[in-house]
Image (spheres, rainbow, N blue to C red):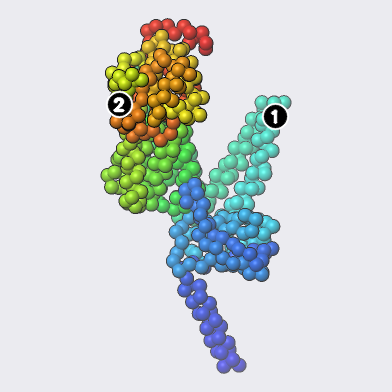
Amino acid sequence: MYIKLIKFLIINLFILINYNLVLCSEDVYIKVQVEGISDTTAYLGYHHGGNQFVKDTVDVDSEGNFAFIFEEKLPEGMYFIVVPDRRHFEVIIDQNQHFKITTNVEDLTGAIVFENSRVNSAFYDYMSFIRKKGEEVRPIRQKMHDPTISEEKRDSLAALSKQIDKEVENKQESYIEDYPDCVLSMIFRAQRQPPVPEEIFKEDGSPDHDASYYKYIKAFWNNVDLSDERMIRTPIYHSMLEHFFDNIVIQYPDSIISTADWFIDKTRDNDEMFKYTLSYLTRKYERAQIMGMENVFVHLVMNYYKTGEVFWIEEERLNRIIDRAKRLEPLLIGKTAPNIKMYKPDKTPVSLHDVSAKYLIVNFYDTGCPACRRQTPKIKELHEKFKEYDVKVFGASADSSKDKWLEYIEKQEIQDWINVNDIENKSRFRDKYDIYAIPMIFLLDENKKIVARDIGVEQLEQLLTFKLKEDTEKPLKEIMQEE
């Protein structure tokens, strides 16, 4: 009896050792069983800022079993598992990357059970709690908008809504207390909205709105550890960046630039946070459709990319980005427009900087361009409306045929424009003005400073109306009457 017991213990110990060797031979072993799927494919995906990527693809057996196995640990963050029909569920990957998941395809999140992952078990307990509280608060908030209820009833419903919100907040606090270093706790802390700061007053007693604004700007990130790169592998950091730079920061290039510099500096303690933040802001303002925001893009490139701080981009691509910024730099709002010498139909040279005008519309076009033909009459009409206020048009044709150009001037009846061409491109106007597409319009002031670039006719009219109202001494009777 004793010998049999010894043999039994040895055999089971051997099995246990081998089982642990299987698990421990890989740094990541996530076993999954999804009832209701078979002989298909499953995916492990991860968040990276505002995007999602596939980390691994595995086969699913006839009983819905599959596993994700890696020799090296996964970076911590929020991941997700995708099964057929794009159904998926979220998984927290922390230091413990050996666990099992079982669930049912008909109710992936409701039926989910974790073995050896207390963090994920608590996460789905929280998710269940949130669903329940959402069902409770939804009818309450709907009733609050009912115009037939009394104020007393509305106040009572509002109190109930706040009570439920407080219960959710307490649940989050409990999770943070139990799992202080967990990814989800990091997200909960980051989502805490900073309180609106008390109003700050100047010495004379008047409100200091600038001081209050900058105090709130700084407080916005108080609950976010910008040295923790796990933030990037959740959706929260990207959404906070978007909200902050779109809705919190004043939408003026100089304000954005100063705030971006301050914020980027706060991410320098972690290479991945610095890399993601700078890349995000660069892409955002390179593609911005709002006039003047290219100033932000140029500033970032010239102060971070050109100075050698961008270590993650290959040299060829880095040089392309820097070259793009260099082309844009002379064309930024507020810069003096590059001077170009072009020629009238009688071959008389005209220097752009020698044209005297309160405002000068510089219109680059081509007679063979359909968009140009549609736009020319609109610019002509705009010129008629504003020319008494010393607004002129510098019509710069990109045509290679002088005959077609002259025919176009006559047909469009734009003889009162300053019509110029440079068939031999001696002025290099395409390079100097970054003419990547036509038509392209610039608006210059009397000192040839760029007021607007790459602007549409409708926006041009609005801008001219505003500028002339702002700085002319003559009453703009016609404009005022039209409004």
How many angstroms separate mark 1 from mark 2 (CA)? Answer: 65 Å
- Picture layout, residue 222 above or below residue 127: above
Query: Which tag is nearer the camera, tag 1 or tag 2?
Result: 2
| Residue found 48% across the figure and 11% down from its top | 479
Position in image of residue 207 (x %, y %): 39, 22
Which residue bears the numbered disc 2? 340
Q: Give the residue at the far front of this rendering.
A: 403
Q: Quadrant of residue 253?
A: top left
**Could you tell me which quadrant the N terminus lies in?**
bottom right
| Residue found 42% across the figure and 21% down from its top | 406
Q: Amino acid at mark 2?
A: Ile
Q: Secondary structure at mark 1?
A: loop
Q: Quadrant of residue 337?
A: top left
Q: Amino acid at mark 1?
A: Asp
Residue 469 is marked as none
| Residue found 46% across the figure and 6% down from its top | 477
| For residue 417, side relative to residue 6 (left or right) | left
Which residue bears the numbered disc 1? 146
Position in image of residue 429 (x %, y %): 33, 30
The foreground one among 153 and 88 is 88
Position in image of residue 173 (x %, y %): 52, 48
| For residue 226, side relative to residue 193 (left or right) | left
The foreground one among 173 and 46 is 46
| Residue found 64% across the figure and 45% down from its top | 133
Position in image of residue 97 (x %, y %): 49, 64
- Picture layout, residue 245 above or below residue 182: above
Instruction: First in sequence, mark 1 or 2: give its number.
Output: 1
Q: Quadrant of residue 114?
A: bottom right
Neighbour class for label 2 at 10 Å: few (<14), some, many (≥20)?
some
The foreground one among 414 and 326 is 414
